[in-house]
Amino acid sequence: MSAQALLEVHDLGKRFASRAGRDSSLWVIRDLSFSVADGEFLTIVGPSGSGKTTLLNMIAQIDVASGGEVRFQSEVAPINDPKSLNPGLSCRIGYVTQEDNLLPWRTMLQNVLFPLVVQGRLNDETRARAEMLIRTVGLAGFENHYPHELSGGMRKRASLIRTLVYDPPVILMDEPFGALDAQTRTVLQEDLLRLWNLGRKTIIFVTHDITEAIALGDRTLVLTRAPARVAGEHKIDLPRPRDIRGILTDPKFIEIYQRIREQVQ
């Protein structure tokens, strides 16, 4: 692993206990290794059931690994010991899931500020940062709206900046735009890149969409079917800032897409 890596995964494995009629445990991930540099936007693609969400859960210390190692800076995640888990590593790892998980009884602004309130960090400076993020993603004017009054895309934007507002060094994203229509998805991809450029956080973004993986990432990992390992690694050498709508016809994009598609299949 690189000495400059912010986060390292080495020979990681995850298995689930055997059930009735099954003689052995099921390995979902086995011997999985990669590293992520500080400020890198890493995208991960793979077949359905290849353990992508399970991988993020282990990195976030929501779930324990069965073997191997996850190291964030100098801290190593526990193995086979759920009681030793530290979910989110004391707010150093943010997690944007497939669902927006906004609290329905709180307004959009209250939802965005909620992590700061819980952490005891709400002050003039952090509130100003929240307001800047709200403006950046086009939610200004909707601060007092409740989640049921917002569109799906607006709720997803609020969910995203709710994670960014407390400024974690690493952000995990699990197919956050998967349930949206194509137009809204493209707009949110543009919003995400705009937000990422503000601070260049380290992002690990899981998706089943090869186009999305290339459009967003600095590098893309392709996972095998379960038990998941790294089948391939692809550097995305498309210039930034990215034109999400325009790169689809770029010869480099087409070449990378074809290489990744061959490995995914």
Image: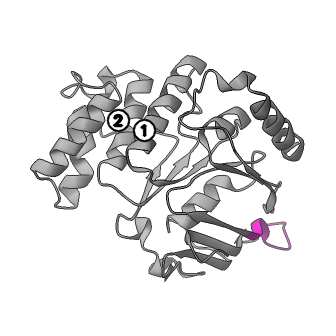
Q: Position of residue 100 (x, y in %)?
A: 42, 38
Q: Taking 5 as reference, is 158 above or below it?
A: above
Instruction: Identify the residue at horizontal 21%, vertical 36% (top origin).
Output: 131
Do the residues under discs 2 and 1 have CB atoms within 8 angstroms?
A: yes
Instruction: Measure the C-alpha gap from mark 2 to mark 1.
Output: 8 Å
- The amino acid type of the residue labelled 2 equals Ala
Q: Where is residue 102 in the image (x, y as percent from the top left)?
A: 34, 39
The one of 90 and 187 positioned closer to us in this rendering:
187
Label 2: which secondary element:
helix
Q: Write down the residue under mark 2.
A: 158
Instruction: Identify the residue at horizontal 32%, vertical 31% (top origin).
Output: 136
**Residue 247 in which image quadrant:** top right
The circle on residue 62 is none
Question: Was residue 28 drawn as part of the magenta stretch in this picture?
Answer: yes
In the picture, which quadrant includes the N terminus? bottom right
Q: Taking 191 as reference, is 264 above or below it?
A: below
Q: What stretch is highlighted in magenta?
A: 20-32
Q: Write down the residue under mark 1.
A: 100
- The amino acid type of the residue labelled 1 equals Asp
Say whether residue 118 is visible: yes
Q: Position of residue 120 (x, y in %)?
A: 16, 61
Crowd around label 1: few <14 · some 14–19 · many ≥20 (10 Å): many
Crowd around label 2: few <14 · some 14–19 · many ≥20 (10 Å): many
